[in-house]
Image (tube, helix red, strand yellow):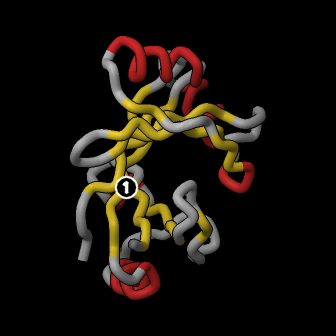
Amino acid sequence: MIGRLNHVAIAVPDLKSGVATYGGTLGAKVSEPQDEAAHGVRVVFVELPNTKVELLEPLGENSPIAKFLEKNPMGGIHHVCYEVDDIIAARDKLKAEGARVLGDGEPKIGAHGKPVIFLHPKDFCGTLTELEQV
């Protein structure tokens, strides 16, 4: 069902510092920051030859990333994102097998402008998992 790894998301307490690390120190191509108010985050994407790294900074204190950073002040891996051809079919199959879809279960538009859902980490080896329709 899952396709290629779309990105690994890393929560950071300071996006500018993260951009300096990936864009400066590591020499990667980094996108311009974009606010994703519906998800409570400001993001950049680090472009790699085979995938992307998403750096996430909280937008406001109610951001899920703010809560993550309270527990992990230095930041860290927040989630992994896999591509799927049909997000509704994937969601329905996963739910039928007992997986928990977070939120109301309906796809939302993600940072790439495509439908996404998040799956409960307890159902996926302790890892918050995002599925994005290609």
Occupied quadrant, residue 106: bottom right
33 to 50, vertically: above or below: above
Picture coordinates of residue 114, whole percent (x, y)? 52, 68
Picture coordinates of residue 113, whole percent (x, y)? 57, 64
Label 1's element?
Answer: strand
**Is 41 situated left or right of 107 in this image?**
right
11 to 21, vertically: above or below: below
- Residue at the location (24% across, 68% down)? 3
18 or 9, which is in the foreground? 18
Occupied quadrant, residue 6: bottom left
Occupied quadrant, residue 100: bottom left
102 to 91, vertically: above or below: above
Q: Quadrant of the C terminus?
A: bottom left
Picture coordinates of residue 119, whole percent (x, y)? 44, 62
103 or 2, which is in the foreground? 2
Mark 1, other Cα within 10 Å: few <14 / some 14–19 / many ≥20: many
**Is 70 situated left or right of 11 in this image?**
right
Q: Amino acid at mark 1?
A: Cys
77 or 109, which is in the foreground? 109
Dot 1 corresponds to which residue?
81
- Residue at the location (48% across, 62% down)? 118
Picture coordinates of residue 71, whole percent (x, y)? 54, 25
Q: Quadrant of the N terminus?
A: bottom left
- Residue at the location (35% across, 27% down)? 28
